[in-house]
Image (cartoon, coloured by chain):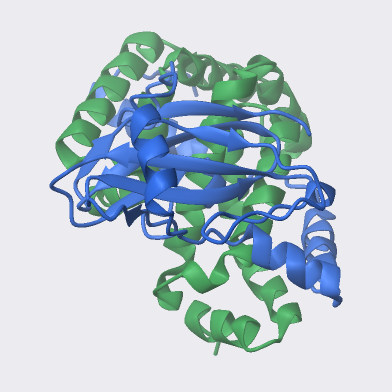
Chain colours: A green, B blue
Amino acid sequence: MNVTDGEVVRRVLGGDAEAYAVLVARYRDRLGRYAIRMLGNVQDSEEVLQDTFLRAYRSLRNCHDPELFGRWLFKILVNRCRTVGATRGRRERLFVGDEVALQNAANYPVDGYVWREEIERALNELPSEQREAFLLKHVEDLRYEEIAEITGVGISALKMRVNRACARMRGLLDGVYRE
Amino acid sequence: MVFTVNDRSNLIDDVAHELRRPVRIDPALDVRVMESVSRELRPGLAATLLRWLATPKPVRLSPAVTAAVAASIALAIWMLPAGISRPAGEVASSAASGFRLVEFSLKVPEASVVTVVGDFNDWDSAATPLEPSSAGDIWVVTVPLDPGRYQYTFLVDGAQWVADPGAPRALQSDFGWPSSVITVPEI
C-alpha cells in the first residue's frame, strides 16, 4: 500500500529529507502538465516546476494539513505560473505544440497534430485568468471549492471565467476537423 | 474516419481529453530537485543564520519609528551596510546574505488580523502576519527579500484584500484581487 502524502510529509519534517523524492515523483507529471498548458513553454515550465518543489520543501512546515499536500503544492505552482507568466509573457507558445507533438510522435497521427495545434492556439487566445480557471476545472478536474482555495478567487467569479473560456474555445474550435 | 467537432456539448470534453494527455518532463528534474534539497541541508552557522534571516518575523517598532512609518504609510527598503548595528527594536541585516529588509505597512484602524500575501511567501495567507503599532491603526512587518520583482497584497481579517496604497499597482489582474508591486534592487 502506498504511503499517504501526510505520512511522507511527516517523515520529511522529521528529518528524512530523502523521502521528499517520493512526493516529487508523485506530483511531477501532473504539475508539469498544468505548467506546460498554462505557460506554453517547456523550459519555463520545468523551471517553475523545480522552483515549486523547492519552495514547497522550504515551506513544508506551513503545510497545515499534510494529507492535503497535493492541493497545497498546486497552490504554489499556480502562483508561480502566474508570476512567471506575467513577467515573461507567453513567448514561444506555438512552439510547444510542435515540441510536445514531436515528443509524442508515436501517439499522434498527422491530422492529430492539426487538432492539437488548434487547441494550443485556442488556449493561447484565452486571457490568463480564463485559461487558468479552464485548465483547473476541465483538465485537472477540480471542484470549484478546490479551485477557489487554490486560486484565492471566489466561486462565482471562477464559474464566470470558466463559462467565458468555454464559450471562447467553442467559438475558436467549432467547425475544426480532425481525423 | 473523418468527423466534425461540431457537437457543442462534446467539444469541451474533447479538448479536455487532449489536454489531459501526459507531457514529457525532463527525467533529470527529480534529481535536480533533490540536489537542491540536499544543498538546503548543508549544516553550518552561516546556513543556520541565513535560514533564520529568511524566515519572515514580526518586529515591534518603537513609538518614534512607528510615527515615521505612519507618516509614509508605505513600504520602505532599508539598505544597511554590513557591520552597522541597529538600535533595539529595529531589524538586523547582513549585506553578505544578498537580501534586503523590506518593511510592509498598512493603516487599518479597525482590523483584528492583517497579513501580507505575495509571491515571496507563495501566497500563503497565514505565513506573514503584521503586528499592530501601539496606537493600533498601523500594521507593520519586516521581511528579508532577495533582489527581484514581487507582487503582493494585504489580507485584512481574512476576508478583505487591500492593495498597498503606497506602492504601484500590479497591471496584471491574474491574481483575482488588487495587488501591488515592489522591486527590490541588487545590493
Q: Position of residue A10 (x, y in %)?
A: 55, 85
Q: Is residue B20 visible?
A: no
Q: Nearer the viewer, residue A168 or B174?
A: B174
| Left or right side of A24 for A142 | left
Q: Nearer the viewer, residue B135 or B19?
A: B135
Give above or below for A54 relative to B145. below
| Left or right side of B163 for B33 | right
Q: Quadrant of the N terminus of chain A?
A: bottom right
Q: Is residue A121 visible?
A: yes
For the point 32% across and 38% down, the residue is: B106
Q: Nearer the viewer, residue B30 or B13?
A: B30
Q: Quadrant of residue A132?
A: top left
Give above or below for B117 relative to B183. below
Q: Quadrant of residue B86?
A: bottom right
For the point 56% across and 79% down, the residue is: A9
Give above or below for B24 relative to A156. below
Q: Position of residue A88 (x, y in %)?
A: 64, 21
For the point 41% across and 46% down, the residue is: B64
Q: Position of residue B83 (x, y in %)?
A: 82, 53
